[in-house]
Amino acid sequence: MMLRTLAMLVCLAGTPLMAGAAEPVTLAAMTPSPRLSSHAVAVVDAQTGQLVYEKNANQIQPFASITKLMTAMVTLDANPSMDAPITITDDEIDRLKNTSSRLAVGSTLTRREMLLLALMSSENRAAASLARTYPGGKAAFIAQMNRKARSLGMTNTVFHDATGLDVRNTSTAMDLVRMVKAAANYPLIRQFTTTAEYYAHPTATRVLHYKNSNPLVREGEWDIGLSKTGYIEEAGRCLVMQTMVGSQRMIMVLLDANGSAARVNDAKSIKNWLEAHPNTWLSG
């Protein structure tokens, strides 16, 4: 039977939803749910905090570059000069995964640009440079990331680095809903995560063309207020968004999909599925 309200769903407003809490009655219990590649999923009404759909939403797992949303919040909370130049050093070289970067050692951009590249195209050296140049350095930055997480009620989350390359950065889909909701309160994070492309000038003679790592942002067909992708092998393909579904703004968290296209297809499937059954989840 189709439920006409969300009265039986768990609400994030007020008391936080904790691991081990009673499972909510979700749309999946009422209509055939879409087949999703993502191992863990949470979909929440951004305005009311109502949980609309969940799958393994309280399972702790790595979440890769979704980390950079917390990196951005901690950076902005310190109220630094966004026009100050930051130069990439040897400290930003990835020695965990040995990933490459187009920001060579010696490249210089403003802090604003480093934040933009970290959020828009998940540039790891840009994110690492924000942590290094934080008051007190990287250790102080990571400590503040964890303090910020606790202040947001992210009780199942821990940070060990600012990029997400460290597999010890672990969380749950429900905790990441809280992080997305908090990050959406920062205008610069909303702007930078939904910027489609940017031309950076890290040296006097070099121009780098960066694109948003989320094809849904680049295509411009969705109304997306915030976006972040993530990937390391242990975390799979991850995607979080604040986006319109029908007339409601939703927070979607998709973790551990088996491919870049799979996480985007999952988001499309969820959107189409919810919009096909509005009476089961629309508030009011």
Image (cartoon, helix red, strand yellow):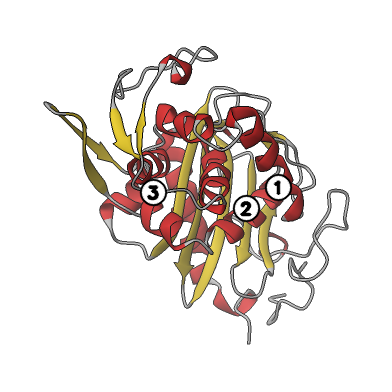
Residue positioned 77% across, 65% down in the render: 25
Q: Are marks 1 and 3 in contact (CB under 8 Å)?
A: no
**Which residue appears at 25% of the width and 46% of the height?**
197
Q: Amino acid at mark 1?
A: Ala
| Figure disc tally | 3
Q: Which residue is mark 3?
A: 82
Residue 18: % across, % down: 83, 53
Q: Nearer the viewer, mark 2 or mark 3?
A: 3
Q: CA distance from mark 1 to mark 3?
A: 23 Å
Q: Is residue 108 above or below residue 31?
A: above
Please report contact status of discs 1 and 2: CB closer than 8 Å, yes or no.
yes
Of label 1 and label 3, which has the lower sequence position?
3
What type is the residue that disc 3 sits on?
A: Met
**Classed neighbour count for the residue bearing mark 1: other residues with Cα under 10 Å, few (<14), some (14–19), many (≥20):** many
Q: Which residue is mark 1?
A: 149
Q: CA distance from mark 2 to mark 3?
A: 22 Å
Which residue sits at x=60%, y=80%? 279
